[in-house]
């Protein structure tokens, strides 16, 4: 997973329009796999404010990720998160729906850009229940989408040596 992280970072550097977003993309290797977090700023970086509609830079970032991740056999888990600010809506639409809708938009965009259908294992919406900065629940970085590149189960062959994929 560390090599995948390096490869994605290099791909971002090669695209000037995405290089400016490097501070808004955090990648960490976890027990689940490689966690790629697209962190929002005060003004929407990847999504329009209060909307599941991606910005132009959000679409570009997701297209690049889909292209790079499509080369791997690994499955994905996609999570949507919001900050603690209440979402004002007359029809009952809340942070729960917004977080789930954003995660689903990421899934659809990645599938449209070559990441095969059926390779996304789970889509989760957490609203404000898992803040990145619990000490500051309204911090913009709590608004994020996480893409987790899951480890392949050891029982799945990945080539002639039957080793587990990163």
Image: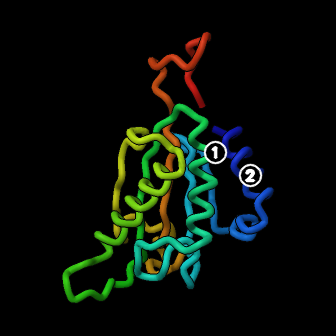
Residue 160 seen from this side: yes
**Residue nearer the viewer, 134 or 27:** 27
Can you say whether 57 is above or below 33 in the image? below
Front residue (pair 141, 89):
89
* Label 2: how many Cα within 10 Å (few below 14, some 14–19, many 20+): some
Q: Place residue 69 in its image quadrant.
A: top right
Left or right, 80 with respect to 113, comes to left
Check the image and tell me how it is coloured: rainbow
Q: Between residue 156 and residue 136, name the one nearer to us.
A: 156
Q: Which circle marks residue 68 in the picture?
A: 1
Relative to residue 57, is residue 109 depicted above or below?
Answer: above
Q: Quadrant of the N terminus?
A: top right
Image spot of residue 142 (x, y percent): 48, 71
Q: Which element carries disc 1, helix, strand or loop?
A: helix
Tell me residue 51's x, y (percent): 41, 78
Which residue is outermost to the left?
91
Residue 166 locus on image (x, y percent)? 60, 31
* Residue drawn at the location 56% of the way across and 63% of the way down: 38
Q: Residue at x 42, y 76 (%)?
A: 83
Q: Compute the Cα span from label 1 to label 2.
A: 8 Å
The label number, if any, that marks residue 106 in the structure image: none
For label 2, the residue is 11
Q: Describe residue 134's horizontal placement relative to residue 38 as left or right.
A: left
Marks 2 and 1: in contact by CB < 8 Å?
Answer: yes
**Visible in this render: residue 141?**
no
Q: Secondary structure at mark 2?
A: helix
The image quarter in which residue 14 lies: bottom right
Identify the residue shown where x is 56% and y is 13%: 162
Mark 1 crowd level (few <14, some 14–19, many ≥20, 10 Å Cα): some
- The residue shown at (61%, 36%) is 71
């Amino acid at each position: 997973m560390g090599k995948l992280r390096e490869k994605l970072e290099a791909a971002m550097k090669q695209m000037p329009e995405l290089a400016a977003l490097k501070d808004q993309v955090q990648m960490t290797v976890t027990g689940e796999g490689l966690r790629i977090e697209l962190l929002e700023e005060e003004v929407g970086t990847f999504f329009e404010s209060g909307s599941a509609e991606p910005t132009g830079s959000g679409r570009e970032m997701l297209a690049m990720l889909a292209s790079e991740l499509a080369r791997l056999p690994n499955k994905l888990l996609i999570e949507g998160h919001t900050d603690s600010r209440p979402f004002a809506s007359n029809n009952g639409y809340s942070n729960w729906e917004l977080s789930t809708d954003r995660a689903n938009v990421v899934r659809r965009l990645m599938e449209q850009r070559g990441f095969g259908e059926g390779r996304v294992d789970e889509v989760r919406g957490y609203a404000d229940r898992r803040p990145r900065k619990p000490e500051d629940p309204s911090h913009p970085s709590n608004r994020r989408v996480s893409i987790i590149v899951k480890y392949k189960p050891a029982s799945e062959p990945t080539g002639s040596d039957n080793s587990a994929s990163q």
